[in-house]
Image (cartoon, rainbow, N blue to C red):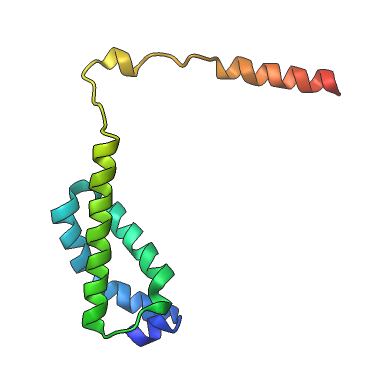
Amino acid sequence: MLSAAVSGDEGGFARLWRDAHPPLLRYLRVVAGDAAEDVAAEVWLEVARKLRRFEGTEPQFRGWLFTLARRRVIDMRRSGTRRPVRLTADVEELDRPAADDTAAAALDNLSTEEALR
């Protein structure tokens, strides 16, 4: 299964994903919480990019997969500390209108284009 996936066989990659994804997702649900699905998707994208260069056995692949996942979780946490989300309890702050009028801007653009023609 692993050697087929490494050589570029889509069926081999699908079997590899079906085998390795459930335990990966269980791990990520514990360490990443609600972001588990997103982190798993990023991990599989990285696997797809780097799989052709992978050399090793299936247990080594699992170790590599979980190492990639752990690194993604660490990156996610670092990113969260650099750009923390500020939640607000003030609904008025969330429901204010935009600074510009999109419909008016679109009409202005259309009339400008018409004048240029």
Toward the left, the furthest residue is 30
Q: Can you give x and y, in whole percent of width and height, for residue 57 in the image? A: 26, 85
Can residue 21 be seen in this snapshot? no
Q: Residue at x 42, y 78 (%)?
A: 52
**Taking 117 as reference, is 77 left or right?**
left
Q: Residue at x 83, y 17 (%)?
A: 115
Q: Can you give x and y, in whole percent of width and height, for residue 80 in the image? A: 26, 40
Q: Can you give x and y, in whole percent of width and height, for residue 86 in the image? A: 25, 27
Quadrant in the picture for residue 114: top right
The answer to whether 102 is drawn above or below residue 81 in the figure is: above
Q: Residue at x 38, y 64 (%)?
A: 46
Q: Can you give x and y, in whole percent of width and height, for residue 113 in the image? A: 78, 23
The answer to whether 29 is drawn above or below residue 58 in the figure is: above
Quadrant in the picture for residue 110: top right
**Taking 52 as reference, is 73 left or right?**
left
Quadrant of the drawing holding the C terminus: top right
